[in-house]
Amino acid sequence: MLTTLLTSALFCLSAGPDPLPGPHAALFTEDLSYKIAPDVVIEEFDGEACWFHPRGGIIPSDTPGAPPTVVITMQKWFVNVSDYFSGLSMIESADFGTTWSEVVTPDTLAWREEEGNTTVGVCDFTPGWHPQTKRLLGMGHTVRYQDGKLMKDPRPRETAFSVFDAGTKQWSAWRIIEMPDLPEFFNSGNGCGQWLIDDNGDLLVPIYFKAKDEDTYATTIMRCGFDGSTITYKSHSDPIRHDSPRGVYEPSLTRYQNRYYVTMRNDDRAYVSSAGPDLQFTPKQPWCFEDGEEIGSYNTQAHWVTHSDALFLVYTRKGANNDHIIRHRAPLFMSQVDTEKMCLIRSTEQIVVPERGAMLGNFGVVTVSPNETWITVGEGLYKPEEAMKHGATGRVWATKIIWSRPNALRLP
């Protein structure tokens, strides 16, 4: 059964008391412009858990000119327990989000039981199309619980993956990428990270890692092979390190004009670094505006929106009348990146998902077509009663960035 979207902000506004914001006026960045059209995929909160980590991937149609199938994976967050996530679910659309399927929860992406009264699952999952093998591949990392709570350190972590069969609409049982037997990979994973596909089909996967007795994470880019069913580690780049607190983690990677860019979370501020094709990264630097002022993002992930003519960053920050939001994790902002100065252009900053009392820090970005890029995020209802006073209702958003000129980057 297909479930019609609650509202389509691109074409109309709701007549009810809580309308979606309409499409923003076009923003001009040199000769490229775009419109921002927020949509709601699903709206649901049962008082105990809300949808979290929604991230999309596409399956191209075999019919020329037909829309791709957009697959969004997500999971429930049990709001009263830190980082307590269910197994993964999915929802899909074959008409650019006009209608969505019902939510499906595959057994192959569920929790598993381990020795020592330990439950292990996969979270922070990001799907993406692998054109060389014509497979939708998803990656995240493992999370472990004991007695209904996050397992205490030292807690092992691995990069997990699953492959979606578009014909049967089945996900393979999730598996773990086998890593070199090195102490630093005791706790390592691709959590919430945008990953890339090299021209030869290799995967470039940003991960963060630390040894069993270490307190701080380092970031690296892992090169892997993928044959359509198995991911195989090949190598990794020199680590990017930060002494404290907790290091640099939850990295996301993009490629723009033959250069790689990685954005990284840190407890105090967000960092950025870049590299050429050799993946030798420059010294990291805090994310700032062009006048040198730090953007005010901290302890939260950021992600890239990449167009062939411009590079953008999506992020959260303080200083936006959002002190009531934990870690200032709403609204979601988007700004153009000055790639020469490695900074954000303040005049281009736009709100792409509004603040309604809920956290929006755990989000994803997917290029759906040459004309559209989507930002997907669920309203995280930390302290639900307080969040709901500000309007939060458990929405999963899909904000459409509609380009004035087609994105000429190689798309799946």
Image (cartoon, rainbow, N blue to C red):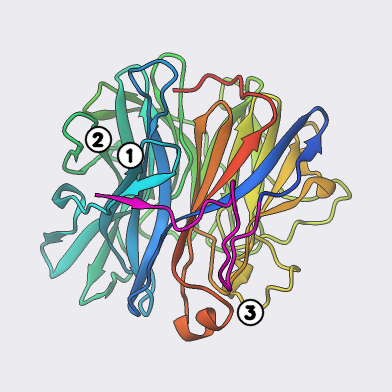
Label 1 environment density (alpha carbons within 10 Å; few <14, some 14–19, many ≥20): many
Residue 183 lies, in percent from the top left, at 34, 47
Residue 137 lies, in percent from the top left, at 31, 34
Residue 123 lies, in percent from the top left, at 33, 55
Q: Evaluate if marks 2 and 1 touch, with contact meaning CB atoms under 8 Å apart.
A: yes
Question: Between disc 1 and disc 3, whose residue precedes?
Answer: 1
Dot 1 amino acid type: Gly
Question: Between disc 2 and disc 1, whose residue precedes?
Answer: 1
Label 3 environment density (alpha carbons within 10 Å; few <14, some 14–19, many ≥20): some
Question: Residue 272 vs residue 349: left or right?
Answer: left
Residue underneath mark 2: 164
Taking depth in this image into account, of 256 and 97 the one nearest to the observer is: 97
Up/down of 398 relative to 48, above or below: above
Label 2 environment density (alpha carbons within 10 Å; few <14, some 14–19, many ≥20): many
Dot 3 amino acid type: His
Q: Which-is-in-front pick, marks 2 and 1?
A: 2
Question: Residue 323 vs residue 375: left or right?
Answer: right
Q: Residue furthest right?
A: 291
Residue 190 at least partly seen: no
Q: Which quadrant holds residue 86?
A: bottom left
Residue at the spot 20% in from the left edge and 77% down from the top edge: 147
- Tell me where the magenta segment starts and ends, as one range: 1-22
Q: Which quadrant holds residue 66?
A: top left
What whole-number distance in Å separates the C-alpha atoms at marks 1 and 3?
34 Å
Residue 297 lies, in percent from the top left, at 67, 60
Residue underneath mark 3: 324
Q: How many marks?
A: 3
Q: Which quarter of the rendered picture does the C terminus lie within?
A: top left
| Residue 18 lies within the magenta run | yes
Q: Which mark is residue 138?
A: 1
